[in-house]
Image (cartoon, rainbow, N blue to C red):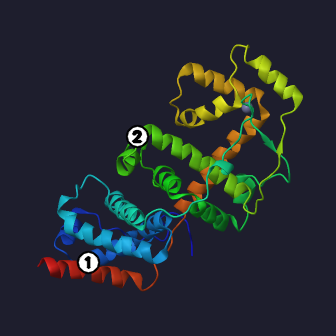
Amino acid sequence: MSREAGSSTPSTPEGPADLERLRQGDEAAWDEVVRAHGGKLLAVARRIVRDEHAAEDCVQNALVQAFLKIGDFQERAALATWLHRIVVNAALMMLRAQGRRAEQPLDDLLPAFDEYGHRVVESGPAPTSPEELAERAEAREIVERAIDALPDAFRVVLVLRDFEDLSTQEVADLLQLTPNAVKIRLHRARAALKTLIERPHRRAPERVPTPLVRRITGIVGRYMPLTITCQEFDGFIMDYLEGSLPERPRRLFEIHVLRCRECRTYLKRYKQTLALGHRICREDAEALPADAPPRLVAAIAKARAGRA
Ligand SMILES: [Zn+2]
């Protein structure tokens, strides 16, 4: 099956006449909605709740809610966006209802810094860069497994912000967090995802002590103008990529990336990780199981009967 965007997407019933049919509960019109959007909705629900059956329940609940609330739908918004919000809400509710699972700590997936703020270099076989991985057949499986392996609090932020393209403020509102907390979680989630896709079969690598020459440059660097540590650099990455870093730190960031090979490589791979994750989640046609559309439409029909 082609994964080219748009090539396999059925026509979406979004014209005014179609909306009127949806409002009247026309079963054929809802069937078209399910077929056009169901696969993507199922994919996002699955990424959040990580369970096939639970994801389908989410989509079913969301479609019933969409049916009941279609009168509120503003025609200026895209129907797909509106449906995605409803599914995301349903999936988050389900995740909360499931309660916390025992989760592996995130710390050993995050970059480490020594006491001088230098990036700690790891020994062992060189990890596969996300760019190299992107060329391989198993890329999808590795990326999906890596996303699934992230703890809920981090995975959800990553999925909503990077793959569903919600704004920081929208994610903050949905999760009842401050925008700053969303940014911190997102940065950690991306860093952890990078580690997980670079070392899918990883054993904890040995950490190489910082070479003497770097330690000395670190000490000297503290007293030099225009110098930031690798650790400070790391804290600026998010804002730098969003273009929201003020001028002076942006300049310090750019000077550091020129001087520090480790951070240069890190930044490159951080960006590659995002691009690869984005591509794989976007291509996610995730065709609906053949028997799903009738089931979903039947749930809508039942809601309609209940309302009549
Ligand atoms: Zn550095």
Q: On the image, numbered disc 1 is attached to which residue? A: 300
Tell me where residue 308 sits by quadrant. bottom left
Residue at the spot x=50%, y=41% of the render?
A: 183
Disc 2 + disc 1, Cβ < 8 Å:
no
The first of marks 2 and 1 along the sequence is 2
Q: Secondary structure at mark 2?
A: loop
Q: Left of 304 or right of it: where is 175?
A: right
The CA distance from mark 2 to mark 1 is: 36 Å
Could you say where residue 18 lies in the image, as x and y percent from the top left?
24, 68
Q: Is residue 295 above or below residue 11?
A: below
* Quarter containing the N terminus: bottom right
Picture coordinates of residue 95 (x, y %)? Answer: 42, 64
Q: Amino acid at mark 2?
A: Thr
What label sits on residue 178 in the rendered view?
A: 2
Image quadrant assignment for residue 197: bottom right
Label 2 CA crowd tier, 10 Å (few <14, some 14–19, many 20+): few
Q: Nearer the viewer, residue 168 or 75?
A: 168
Residue under the image location 82 percent in, 26 percent down: 215
> Above or below — where is 135 with respect to 214?
below
